[in-house]
Image (tube, rainbow, N blue to C red):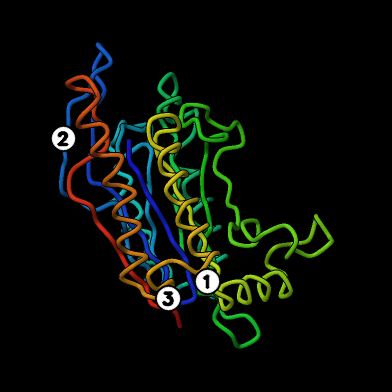
């Protein structure tokens, strides 16, 4: 399991993640097999990055019927090199979604399909009417926050920023396509007026409650203009790190031996606004 956090402001997009990779044993406890490797992959062509949580590795049946190893980080790193072949971040995001659906499926994993839940944060800057506007595309194959509740429809992709602005600032049309220029312009205005977007994914019960609480406090402090400096990139980076560190400290102190699934080095990636 992993904790990933993405924060978007008018100054930057900030990604953060822990480093633990674990293998669950029959007893329910876990072996930690990695403590240092990042789960964040830069996508420089779109001034963006990918981060992931959920299944880190497994064995799949390839198109030749052979059992092969699959590693999420290496797969995403390989695919990120293809970003320059696409004209927009949305096209690249849909390419990732389609490639994941052809690679990770119920047929490929069979009885182990419940272990294949993956959530990907893909941040990028889109050029809309000559203006660069950040977006977070969420790519996932699980329903809600339960990574073992695998969607029968496979991977889907969602825009996240417009959905996250306050209801009173949204357009009256509830069914509007969120890549519409008016939606994107409202996102840009929200950020320019000091708004900040906070996104996270992790263990639905042991991580998300504390993460959401800390991020809500950060958002309220920002809305009340009492943060140290809401435009400082270093502050956003420190909030992202602190969120993950709080989960690590809780699990280190209060969980039984062999049950800690978040830990190791905390990685960050900062992409300054365009």
Q: Nearer the viewer, mark 3 or mark 1?
A: 3
Q: Is residue 72 above or below residue 57?
A: below
Q: Residue 87: x, y in percent?
A: 54, 75
Q: Residue 38: x, y in percent?
A: 24, 53
What residue did someone put label 2 on? Answer: 33
In depth, the one of 232 and 144 nearer the eye is: 232
Taking the spot 49% from the left edge, 28% from the top edge, the residue there is 107
Measure how far apart labels 2 and 3 are at the Cα level: 38 Å
The residue sitting at the right extreme is 172
Taking the spot 40% from the left edge, 34% from the top edge, the residue there is 203
In depth, the one of 195 and 260 nearer the eye is: 195
Q: Secondary structure at mark 3?
A: loop
Q: Earlier in the sequence, mark 3 or mark 1?
A: 1
Q: Is residue 200 left or right of residue 183?
A: left
Quadrant, the C terminus? bottom left
Taking the spot 55% from the left edge, 68% from the top edge, the residue there is 195
Q: Is residue 16 left or right of residue 213?
A: left
Measure how far apart labels 3 and 1 are at the Cα level: 15 Å
Q: Is residue 69 left or right of residue 186?
A: left
In depth, the one of 147 and 254 nearer the eye is: 254
Q: Nearer the viewer, mark 2 or mark 3?
A: 3
> Which mark, by number, is residue 134?
1
State which quadrant residue 209 falls in: top left
State which quadrant residue 235 falls in: bottom left
């Amino acid at each position: 399991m992993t904790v990933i956090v993405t924060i978007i402001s008018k100054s930057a997009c900030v990604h953060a993640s822990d480093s633990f990779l674990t293998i669950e044993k029959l007893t329910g406890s876990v072996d930690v097999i990695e403590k240092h490797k990042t789960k964040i992959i830069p996508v420089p062509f779109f001034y963006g990055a990918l981060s992931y949580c959920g299944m880190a590795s497994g064995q799949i049946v390839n198109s030749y019927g052979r059992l092969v190893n699959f590693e999420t980080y290496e797969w995403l790193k390989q695919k990120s090199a293809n970003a320059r072949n696409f004209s927009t971040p949305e096209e690249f995001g849909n390419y990732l979604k389609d490639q994941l659906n052809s690679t990770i499926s119920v047929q490929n994993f069979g009885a182990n399909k419940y272990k294949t839940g993956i959530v990907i944060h893909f941040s990028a800057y889109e050029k809309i009417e000559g203006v660069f506007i950040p977006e977070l595309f969420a790519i996932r194959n699980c329903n809600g926050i339960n990574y073992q509740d695998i969607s029968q429809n496979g991977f889907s992709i969602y825009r996240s920023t417009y959905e996250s602005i306050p209801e009173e600032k949204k357009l009256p049309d509830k069914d509007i396509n969120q890549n519409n220029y008016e939606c994107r312009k409202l996102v840009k205005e929200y950020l320019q007026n000091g708004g900040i977007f906070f996104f996270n994914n992790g263990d639905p019960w042991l991580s998300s409650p504390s993460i959401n609480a800390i991020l809500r406090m950060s958002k309220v402090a920002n809305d009340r203009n009492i943060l140290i400096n809401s435009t400082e990139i270093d502050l956003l980076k420190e909030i992202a790190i602190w969120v993950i560190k709080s989960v690590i400290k809780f699990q280190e102190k209060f969980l039984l031996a062999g049950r800690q699934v978040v830990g190791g080095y905390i990685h960050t990636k900062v992409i300054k606004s365009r």
